[in-house]
Image: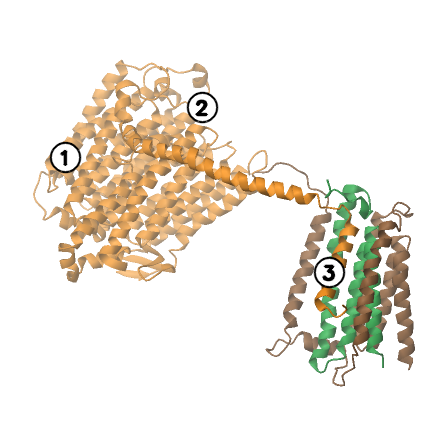
Amino acid sequence: MIAQIYFSVFATLALACALYLLVARHPLYGALSLIGTMLSLAGIYSLLSAPFLGVVQVLTYAGAIMMLVVFVIMVLNSSHDHVVPRFDSRGFILLLVPAVLSACLLYVLHTTHPLVDAGAIQGSAEAVSIQLFNTSQQGSGAWILFEFIGLLLLAAMVSAVVLAKKHLDKKDCV
Amino acid sequence: MISQSNYLWILPLLPLLGSAILGAIALATSHHEKGANEHRTGFLAVLFPALAFILTAFLSLQLEIGHSLRQVVAPWIVADAITVNFGFLFDDLSRIMLLFITGIGSLITLYSVGYMHGDRGFTRFMAYLNLFLFSMITLVLADNLVLTFLGWEGVGLCSYLLIGFWHKEAANGAAANKAFLVNRAGDLGFLLGIFALMTLAGPAGISYTELREWLHNPLNAEILAGQGQVLVVLAAFFLFWGCTAKSAQIPLLTWLPDAMAGPTPVSALIHAATMVTSGVYLVTRMSDLFVLSPAIMHMIAFVGLGTAMWAAISGLFQDDIKKVLAYSTVSQLGFMFLAAGCGAFDAAIFHVFTHAFFKATLFLGAGSVIHALAGEQDLRKMGGLAKTLPRTFLILVFGWVSIIGIPGTAGFWSKDLLLERVYNAPFMGHTLYYAALATAVLTAIYMTRMMVLAFMGKYRGDEHVKAHAHESPWTMQLPMWILAIGSLLAGFLWAGMIPGADLFGRTLSSIVGDAQRIAVGAEHEGPSAFVFAVLGTAAAVIGLLTSFIIFTKFVPSPVGLPAPRGFGKVWTFAFDSLHALFIKPTRALAWVLQTIVQSLFEALQNAIGLFAIQTSDLLRKLQSGSIRLQLGLSVGLTLLIAVAILGRLF
Amino acid sequence: MIDILTVQIIAALLFCIGVAVALVRRNIFFVLMGVELALNATNLSFIGFSRTFSGSASMVGQIVPLFSIAVAAAEACVGLAMVILIFRARESLDSESFTSLKE
């Protein structure tokens, strides 16, 4: 019962913040509303018996990624963003695409009736880690992806540093 | 007796490490104005060869005569037909070679620290020198022919790198190319020799110790007498072919005089003391094989004698001090092969040993003269330098008396031992001896000519240059003095007429003794060693006096470049003309390929490229220029495709 | 308990709003943020479906969003670096003004 109330609150908040992202004037407002969406989603994850993921969402998404986005916005975008107009004719025409997409998705969902399985494991950090790091033959093998994700993050870090660095002096070598 | 050692791998590693470190330093400082700090680089450059020498000395002292150390580090080629390992063999022969290679190598590296001072490529030079020492050590220390070939090629490469060291002048590059290509022509012979040996003896054909056993095995005697005889002759011929290129014998000797384009330490180390003696080393190492084919032995002797005479005559026409010494090297190498061809392998190695000392002394001394005269190499522009550069003069005198064979010097002992053995050779020994004696007279003539023109008489060059003439720094003097004293005293390791002083000969007997017995036959009585000594000294003195009288009177005046002219040109460049006969068809073929075939391929490639450009120009017009539109179209069309495939909505 | 269908509908709507933001807005920051929103929506969808499986398969719905978050982090990092580069070159954040691919 109380879970339903919480769920409705979080769901409404998420959708409202997402809609505000569509019409926000300044990217910083947009970033803040995106953070709001993410935090509500984190709450929904916890209600759906995935508390570990809820915490990870808050820490990583809302905490690190959005912080990075906000930082770059503040560095690059001037305080009064009158330069980039919000909507134009092309934008309205392009609105058709997500409209059709939502129609298709809703129709497909309408015809399915997903049910909760009784044997589903109650989510927690321990349960996730048991499944994630199961290195036996019968396991899902997701631990290898875990290692690759580490390499991916390293590559992203290095490339971001190299890309955004100031130009080195160009003296001829050898 | 062979025993296992665990330290042999360090010997080639040390200069290789030095080369890698110095190469890294050279690369890291490549974009600086000046190079790396010369003191530190020079210290490193001398350190590694010096350490190799200390290790060699240590191992040598421990090794008893007749013993050898063996170490197989790792397998290299493992196949059905053949197995080759990275193996090292430290026996009496390699001990001697290694001692003077590492010793003289360290001294000449020290000399180069002084000689190459101020050169922008100092570090690069030191890296190349260390690489050369690594290759040479590998060549001599290897226990099988294939690893020796690796070192053989390595010294060829380093020779190329070092001759063309001052690469900004095209002539140096051309000389380096010539050296490399002529050596390559010889390497073909080496490879064919390896193949012939493998056909003859299977896997035992390439490992030295196993080949010796195979050849001495009575079970193989029928093969050797029958069908194996052809293979033996072929293998010996091909291997000798390889040696003619590396040791500059007829017909592949044209590269050595041109190689004087490199810096003088290079000429001293590579083209006097070490690399060119690898041919003699190989012949001695494979002595068991060579003595089985008397025809090839005779060929070696005649080629050696011919080369010695030819180079001696050419040396008379040279006006560049380094070219005189280059032809002198070729001539002395001819003597060594003459000895080897007559079955006196240990005398040949002894001459290698003493030659390393006195030739290095002569070259380093010449380098000191060139350094003092700020790059002047033309003998016609020198003269009277005995008073200006007394210490250099004294050093060159030591080298000079040694090479012409004044009694007591190293050159005297080795040359006279060599000539005595030649006289006692079973096939045409007497004829060979008299011809070699005449060549010794010629040697004395042209070497004295060089000394007279450079140091006696009046100075014929630029006064300005003479005013600035100065003796070399201690880094150059110290190695020269050590080598000069060596060229006087090294001969006493095998002073034939002094009883008991034959350490050298006894050392080598385990390696070449059997071969020599087969080649020479039983000991027979001939004139005593004293007679040979007298004849040799007489040859030297006659040549000395003749040359002295002639060249103090007829002093050449500088006209044009110091290259030989007229009749001298015909003599000196004879083999270049011979090679040109082979080069011309190759050039014609290259021209055909260049103009016709290459142009065709280029046209084809350009056509493909043109097609790609046209197509992409067409496609470029499809770009809309708006990111949003592209994104929207991507998402929309993907949606359309998904819907069409799933098909349930229609 | 919470109805799974409702969760999926919310996920679908969020996804479409995210795509709309990415396509409609001209400021490139909004494009990036729209993509992030869409990624979040797919994570929600995964977690919503995770309870319809039994046993260990139900955890897959929680592991995949974990990786998705990590990949989104990497992508945001590199994407923002490129935004900085583009801004340095063109001094503009308007995606309509990046037309140099068209001649």
The reply to whether label 1 and label 2 mark residues of one chain is yes
- Give the color of chain A as drawn: brown
Under mark 3, the amino acid is Thr
Residue matched to label 2: B374
Mark 3 burial class by Cα count in 10 Å: few <14, some 14-19, many 20+: few
Indicate the secondary structure of the residue bearing disc 2: loop
Q: Are marks 1 and 2 in contact (CB under 8 Å)?
A: no
Percent x, y of residue B164: 43, 34
**C-alpha gap between disc 3 and disc 1:** 96 Å
Mark 1 burial class by Cα count in 10 Å: few <14, some 14-19, many 20+: many
Residue matched to label 1: B433
**C-alpha gap between disc 1 and disc 2:** 42 Å
Whether residue B343 is visible, yes or no, is no
Indicate the secondary structure of the residue bearing disc 3: helix
- Give the color of chain C as drawn: green
Q: Which mark is residue A85?
A: none
Whether residue A103 is visible, yes or no, is yes
Give whichever of discs 3 and 2 has the lower sequence position. 2
Give whichever of discs 1 and 2 has the lower sequence position. 2
Frontmost residue, B259 versus B424: B259
The reply to whether label 3 and label 2 mark residues of one chain is yes
Residue B472, quarter of picture: top left
Colour approach in the figure: by chain
What's the chain of the residue with tag 3? Answer: B
Instruction: Chain letter for orange, please.
Output: B
Total marks in image: 3
Percent x, y of residue B147: 35, 52
Under mark 1, the amino acid is Tyr
What's the chain of the residue with tag 2? Answer: B
Residue B499 relative to residue B65: left or right = left
